[in-house]
Amino acid sequence: MKPIISVRNLSKKYIIGENIHGRGARTFRDIFDYKTKRLFRRDVKRSKKNTTIWALKDVSFDVNQGEVVGIIGRNGAGKSTLLKILSRITEPTEGEVTMRGRVASLLEVGTGFSGELTGRENIFLNGSILGMKKREIRQKFDEIVAFAEVEKFIDTPVKRYSSGMYVRLAFAVAAHLEPEILLVDEVLAVGDAGFQKKCLGKLDQVASEGRTVLLVSHNMAVLQGLCSRSFLLSFGQLVLSGLTQHVVSEYIRQMTSNSGSSVALTEDHPNRLPRMQSVIHKVTIQNEKGDYTDDFEQKEPIILIVYYDTARIGQTLAGAGFILESAGGVRVGGFNTYMGMEPPHKLPSRGGVRFVIREPSLTPGRYMLTVSVGAHQNYLVDKIERVLTFNVRALDIYGTGYLLAPEDGVVAMKCDVFVE
């Protein structure tokens, strides 16, 4: 039986600085943008040098019908570019892609829907694109609307939807219109926890029905729960393919290989999210004595300091925060200044935010810290994922001689026991 997805020597090249709108402009808007830029930038000398970036380079793989495959990699590894090529949104520079089945994709908020059309009209439009008849779409219509929880707004243009409503409807359409192949990027992070749980259940159902799913996610626990096999991309190349558990382990090793220290200088950190501004310049962890260390005993306080400077951006920060994850990608929890400080929320133009992490008591193992700063609660200015890691050593915290191990979970439970 032939693979449902076959990729051979796939490459995608971008040229930074290339005049893409002046030569080969495809639409009136392209030409208008180009002419406008020339009008206002005549005093700017044109760069003679272009930088070539290979977002993907010689990527080859097969996916069989009914497989749920994870795609893992750092930011900028080429994951989203790969899905855009598979979705036929972007043309490859080199290589071939064969897709044997109808493809539905959920890549980013805004993809696949027309903002001027209502939710109802977009459902029928997307179904038609997938080659479905109106009768088939009507049969699924009520189920889609109920899943997306947008009954009251189904006849409202989707440009008026919140990002959460938009993603709920987009996912419902992509998952319910029965494509043979479903491509899903990290858009589920927009929804609330309840909807994310519902989406994961639907993906599980889709897979059980024999359809094929390619899933990009930074949530390693989700990937390990859904995907039997995964691909690891690094700098546009496929560096590992195999059982998800093994691929996740290698990814975590790569992510933490440069973080086994108690001090991270983050001016040009590779784990900074795209489009973030370089405001965080250093992150440190230390013990209560003030010693820089990445090795702690259970129940020992961990002091995290996030140093920042807003001089470059001329923007006031309102707060800072962190996220704590286990080595397996399970989110333990997080904290930010909005939780610990009363309004008004405002940080000095430069300085450091100190977090003293006392609870919960962690089980032994390796943990990762992600840090961020923002102009307000819903607007990040800078975020660096898994910037530092630290180790927790076992201690007889119960006083019974029983030492916890990583397989006991990520937190040490407190419980009273009575035998009756």
Image (cartoon, grey):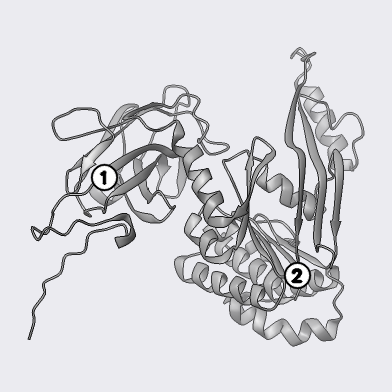
229 relative position to 385: left or right: right
- Residue 400 versus residue 387 in the image, above or below: below
Read off the residue under disc 2. 122
- On the image, which quarter does residue 160 sit in? bottom right
Splitting the image into 4 quarters, where does residue 397 fall?
bottom left
Residues at discs 2 and 1 in contact (Cβ within 8 Å) = no
Residue 382 in view (yes/no): no
Which residue is rendered at x = 8% and y = 81% of the image? 419
Which residue is painted at 89% across and 42% down in the image?
A: 28
Where is residue 334 drawn, in percent x and y?
33, 51
Position of residue 93 measured from the top left corner of the image (x, y, whole percent): 85, 38
Q: On the rendered structure, is 380 left or right of 87?
A: left
Q: Secondary structure at mark 1?
A: strand
In front of the other: 388 or 357: 388
From this view, report whether residue 28 is shown above or below residue 215: above
Residue 310 in picture, x, y percent from top left: 41, 26
In this rendering, the label closer to the viewer, 2 or 1: 1
Q: Position of residue 23 (x, y in %)?
A: 91, 29
Per the rendering, the mark at residue 392 is 1
Q: Amino acid at mark 1?
A: Val
Q: Which badge, 2 or 1, is on the more N-terminal residue?
A: 2
The type of residue carrying mark 2 is Asn
Quadrant where the N terminus sits is bottom right
User: Does any portion of residue 365 appear in the rendered image?
Assistant: yes
Find residue 366 and name its label. Answer: none
Q: Is residue 37 left or right of residue 379?
A: right
In the image: residue 398, left or right of residue 365: left
Mark pair 2, 1: CA separation: 51 Å
